[in-house]
Image (cartoon, rainbow, N blue to C red):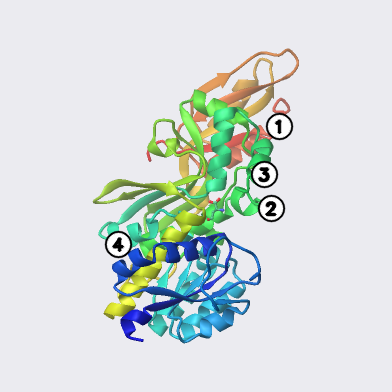
Amino acid sequence: MSDSEKGIGVGILGFGTVGTGTVKLLLENAEHLRRRVGVPIRIRGIADLDVGRDRGVAVPEGVLTTDGFQVVRNPEVQIVIELIGGTGIARDFLLEAIRRGKSVVTANKALLAEHGPEITRAAQAAGVDIGFEASVGGGIPIIRTLREGLAANRIQAIYGIINGTCNYILTRMTQEGKAYPEVLAEAQKIGLAEADPSFDVDGIDSAHKLAILVWLATGAYIPPKEIFVEGIRDLSALDIAFAREFGYAIKLLAIAKEKGGGVEVRVHPTMIPSDHLLATVGGADNAIYVKGDFVGSSLSYGQGAGMRPTASAVVSDVIEIARNLRGGGVGRIPPSGFFLHDRGDTAMVSPFDDVRCEYYLRFQVVDKPGVLSKIAGALGAHSISISSVIQKGRKEESAVPIFIVTHHAKESDMRAALAETDRLPDVLDRTRMIRIENNL
Ligand code: HSE
């Protein structure tokens, strides 16, 4: 068989939703891919523990196996595609493939966020490529956007809606006024949210993806444990409704900002002006808003997960690597997109206590004279200035909410002030606080 007929061999580890989408794409668009690459892309192996299930796709004969290492070691496999997920066996497979001189593609954001430096150093030492377009934003080509399209810019800020599960839940809470547990249960019923949703709703998935985006923006790595993370479990329909009254929408944002010699990184529910483009990103969609020093603002938007969009991203990496293999360009671009960087290998994370933003506060108080002044006094004592106040309803002898929006304040001051107000006898419940980003 001639080289051009033999084509480029790929092996797929993990035949779940994304694996199935990838196989479908490779088969359905085979001729299109051949024209893109110049030679065919051929599936030489697919490994999964479950090889009996019908996935509705005509798998080429003899490629299915339960042994991932068989795929990794197959000499006909030049590109190993890891779609297993997690940080255990997936890491072993990737490192083994790299040791064998094979380029790899992965959609595994947890693995890259936790072990990125180890894996990318191994890939560079072995002179192979590593593609990870599917690790952030599903079908949105944000990895290439940062590494190539916006490479000329110093990136000043990134604001990402990068967890579809959270965005879906928040969108429905906003549109229907429903409570978090109710919408979560519905999202689980339709298979959008996991049975254990913690990874998504507690913001961990967003933090992993943010670590990858910062790495691409700065060339320096941030261990995910250094990212401040607050999820969406605590949000109430009441806060969403009042945010709207103040002119804001609430989104779970992954935020990175250039700050001095370091970077400010955080994931938390954020109030953003209702007329900002990010506020219009609904359902399970993702969007990443990037500010660069020359390009200005740039928004990438699309489906952040799902079989077909994620397969689109996976196969975009396969195409790039296959072209490199053919043209002798493997290793041309380092994984982060930086040959040298000015911060060392690890980014300096600026302390979360030093973050400055505006805040929305909801106090649950006894409705009697003097309560508001005590709250205002505690805020003032910590250098926090009030921008607006709303109190709705008056129910004798019962609790009423007071909503306050502040001017810019320092995170550590805000926490100290709330510790004080929450000790006031007339404040009946833990105060809810949501950070505001007005100037994005
Ligand atoms: N669980 C993720 C989300 C999709 O809800 O966006 C995979 O990254």
Question: In the image, 194: left or right of 272?
Answer: right
* Farthest right residue in view: 397
Identify the element where label 2 is drawn.
loop
Q: Is residue 99 above or below residue 417?
A: below
Kindly check if marks 1 and 4 are in contact, taking CB atoms under 8 A apart as contact.
Answer: no
Specify few, some or many for label 3: CA neighbours under 10 Å numbering under 14, 14-19, or 20 or more. few
> Are the residues at dot 1 and dot 2 in contact (C-beta closer than 8 Å)?
no
Residue that mark 2 sits on:
196
What element does badge 1 sit on?
A: loop
Callout 1 amino acid: Asp
Q: Is mark 2 within 8 Å of ligand 1?
A: no
Of the residues shown, which amino acid type is indicated by label 2?
Asp
What's the residue type where badge 3 is placed? Answer: Lys
Looking at the picture, tell me which residue is in the foreground, 398 or 172: 172
Q: What residue did someone put label 4 on?
A: 148
Task: Tell me the distance, in whole angstroms, between the alpha carbons under discs 1 and 2.
Answer: 28 Å
- Does any portion of residue 136 appear in the rendered image? no
